Image: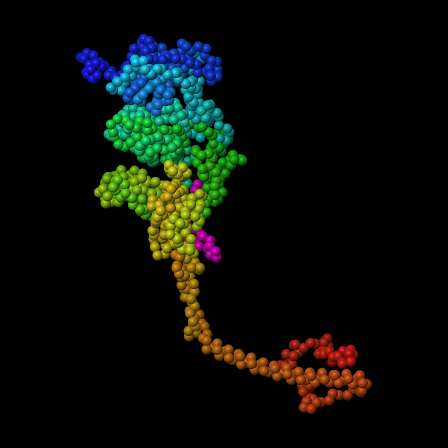
Amino acid sequence: MKAQACRPCAEGTYSLGTGVRFDEWDEVPHGFANVATSLEVDDGFGDAVENCTASTWVPLGDYVASNTDECTATLMYAVSLKQSGTVSFEYIYPDSSIVFEFFVQNDQCQPTVEESRWMRTTEKGWEFHSVELSRGNNVLYWRTTAFSVWSKVPKPVLTQLMFKWAEPKICSEELPQAVKLPPSGVKTRCPPCNPGFAKSNGSACQPCPYGSYSNGSGCLSCPVGTEPALGLEYKWWNVLPPNMETTVLSGINFEYKGMAGWEVAGDYIYTAAGASDNDFMILTLVVPGFSPPSPVLEDVESKEVARITFVFETICSVGCELYFMVGVNSRSNTPVETWTGPKGKQSYTYIVEKNATMSFTWAFQRTPYHGAGRRYTSDVAKLYSVNVTNVLGGVASFCRRCAPEPAGSCAPCPPGSAVDRSSGTCQPCPPGTYLRGHPSDGTPACHPCGPGTRSNQLRSLCYNNCSFSLSLPGRVLHYDFSALGTGAAFASGPSFTAKGLKYFHHFSISLCGNQGRKMASCTDNVTDARLPAGEGDPARVVTSYVCQAILVPPDVMGYKTPVSSQPVSLADRLLGVTAGSTLDGVTSPPEYFPPGHPDLPDVVFFYRSNDVTQPCSGGRATAIRLRCDPLRPGTGTLSVPSKCPEGTCDGCTFHFLWVTGEACPRCSAGHYRPIVSACVGGIQRTTYVWREPRLCRGGQSLPAQRVRRCRSADFWLKVGISAGTCAAVLLAALAAYFWKKNQKLEYKYSKLVMNAAAKESELPAPDSCAIMEGEDAEDDLLFATKKSLFGKIKSLTSKRTSDGFDSVPLKTSSGSTAMEL
């Protein structure tokens, strides 16, 4: 200190540098505060402890021991650092009946982000614990609260304390302006238990037995007709769960550093400071297996065995990254989702489709660049809750409905059956419906299939058998997509450049299949790309209706074959097939693509995916718009919206336009028209041709040409002239006849008038009618005895009396009564 320079210690001596160590505990060293309070005074739990003044930390020579009663004892030490430093101590914590906390607060009584509040119990003697201290004022708290069970006395906590100052030390705690001790800590209740656990006779949380459930306060038996929904749910982080591990992985040489990367903090778990900013802070959860309530069938809508859901948050000042990785049967972890930069509090769900030992890993890196010192220790990742369903040997936080057996236990419903709420028995889903809803979400129920789909025999999914019918005004169109459904169509989307290399979005699509089997697959072969053929299996294969991978062309980086990576599923289940633009909340805007034919609308297949991503909490969706073009045979062409070259505009819904001749409807009678030729040589031909443009394929073929006999125009002209001549002659004869008949009627009428006039003047009536000049008396006789053709016509049209004679009413000019002839 005299020379104001650091010099080596003399031989035979040692120095802590700028640090200070406390290893003699004959008495509480200077600078420490030792207080005890009653936790029960203000909270009203039982009888208050009358006097806690003696329930403090007790120095016992080589160590200091905590209290063993139900008082809260706090050992405090305040220190002011000009640079960041470290506090390290050894402790024995053998009894979980004592709650042991260690935390650090600044001069404003705010806990620092490096806190590791709830200490783990020790199993193998003394354990070492170290916490980073930030620059400025720091107050260190060791706090214990014991819970005695009847006559059992808990074992105390023993602590050996060491401090190390940051070098060089340029301050003195002995000066008058040094930091004073802060007030004692805030009283806290005992930490709560996680769902499915409850406190036993002691203070430790124990799992509830099978057949019961708990929200963390106490175990309750499941009601009749229900069963516990087994799983694991962590939302209180008082201690690190036994099936979790944490470590730090070097960001330079990828070696494990043997230190904790995550620390518990009550209602969340967060990343510790680490040794350097580019280290990976690792947290791993291991699940031995799963026990789904019913067997998972191969031919189902979703092969979900379980799911893991967690709520997280990242607080970053630079480009930090949080990785979520999944490992199967102790194999290497595969990243399934990555978040970059600060992210607000949000939820993420991953679907488990294989029953095996699974490991779920969270890895947080503050920056990928290595630098001297730690500049971003305030950048942290937090996990608030983790929930895994259907865990083998798990606990239950709720009970779900089931079909009870006579013995009182529950039996799972057979495939395609659901529990009827009224009767409590398993009832099969009716035709046209399927069983939807995983037991993780509650009780499954039967739901109707979407348009253009039908349910399979097990009622486990809805599918399209590669056929579709569309009703239009005046016609019905029938489609057959077999060529597109059973085989996968591949298309490479627009290229993009990353890190100087050119990549492609590679899509694999299969519309439909036999009973809804998914034929499209995407493979991750990056890890095995350089192995000889046949020596390596694909690292990951995704099978679905639509999947996507990143494709590296074979001429890049010396690869002999294309390399694909990051396969994801875009369509796991078929929602329906329709000519509309919206179905079940999924929209396919027609304006995303060029307009099609006005008389033939596009047919749209709508899908959803079970993969939940950061922006898509409900999973991805896909809409494939099929358009007929007979000039593009085979698989045709696949395109994405020009506005969205990656196939999606929002990261959740993918849009495709598939133009192919296989998307045309089957040909029918409405797709062709007849052409009738002229009658040549007594023969007329009818030929059938397709309407233009031809918007159909297969189906009904063109009918053969029809030939029939016919008459020429000359023949029909002759027939018409002959018929007209005959009609003219007949009309002339009829006119002559009626003219002559009219003359005779006029004569008879005149005769009757004369007879009537003679009668009125009392003149004798003539004995016979006079014959006028030019008349022939024998003509009347001839007409009376023999009817000619004209007579027959007349007899049909004349009015007859009851005696068969013609009746003609007459009336005299004097107004006398009418006379009949």
Q: Position of residue 611 (x, y in %)?
A: 38, 38
Number of marks: 0
Q: Is residue 474 magenta?
A: yes
Q: Nearer the viewer, residue 60 or 729?
A: 60
737 relative position to 193: left or right:
right
Residue that sits furthest to the left in the current view:
11
Q: Residue at x 67, y 90 (%)?
A: 774
Mark yes or no: residue 478 visible: yes
User: In the picture, residue 37 is in which quadrant?
Assistant: top left
Relative to 376, is 92 above or below?
above
Q: Nearer the viewer, residue 805 or 522?
A: 522
Q: Nearer the viewer, residue 92 or 208?
A: 92
Q: Nearer the viewer, residue 142 or 8?
A: 8
> Dividing the image into 4 quarters, which one contains the C terminus?
bottom right
Q: Residue at x 75, y 88 (%)?
A: 768
Magenta region, residue range: 457-479
